[in-house]
Amino acid sequence: MASPSVIVVQPQLTVASASSSLWQTGLMDCCSDCGVCLCGVFCFWCLEREVASDMNECCLCGGSVAMRTLYRTKYGIPGSICSDFCTVLWCPVCSVCQIKRDINKRKKMGIF
């Protein structure tokens, strides 16, 4: 008769890696996805609506401080409401492009 096997170490579930809790691209990292940046420059409102749609939110709030803060807190990205406000105020196109690039990368990684 065989002796029963004893499990010494249980497998651990890892929900998020270190790289998933940071922005996947920089604020002005346009070269990482030129299509998103071109859409942001030439059809900003379309990109805002797309981001809002991806996040199941109202189509009018895609580029808002609230949307950026919601996204950042959902994925544990460091920052503050003040930094979100300043980013949206001074670089609205870059802000929405960064969120959209991040969404695209997280979809590819299977964590969106």
Image: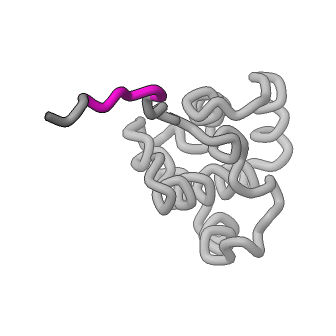
Residue that lies at the very extreme toward the front in this rendered image? 1
Asked if 68 appears above or below 73 in the picture, the reply is: below
In terms of depth relative to the viewer, which is nearer, 52 or 31? 31
93 in magenta: no
**Residue under the image location 69 percent in, 53 percent down:** 24
Residue that lies at the very extreme toward the left in this rendered image? 1
Colour option used: one colour
Count of marks overlaid on the render:
0
Asked if 25 appears above or below 7 in the picture, the reply is: below
Residue 14 percent across, percent down from the top left: 52, 35
Residue that lies at the very extreme toward the top in this rendered image? 81
Residue 92 percent across, percent down from the top left: 74, 48
Q: As drawn, is 86 to the left or to the right of 54?
A: right
**Residue under the image location 50 percent in, 50 percent down:** 51
In terms of depth relative to the viewer, which is nearer, 96 or 73? 73
Asked if 19 appears above or below 100 in the picture, the reply is: above
> Which residues are the magenta region?
4-9
> Residue 65 lies in what quarter of the image?
top right
Which corner quadrant holds the N terminus? top left
Residue 34 percent across, percent down from the top left: 68, 76
> Residue 29 lies in what quarter of the image?
bottom right
In terms of depth relative to the viewer, which is nearer, 13 or 96? 13
**Residue under the image location 53 percent in, 60 percent down:** 104
Is the magenta region chiefly helix, strand or loop?
loop
In terms of depth relative to the viewer, which is nearer, 7 or 3? 3
Residue 60 percent across, percent down from the top left: 48, 40
**Residue under the image location 50 percent in, 35 percent down:** 15
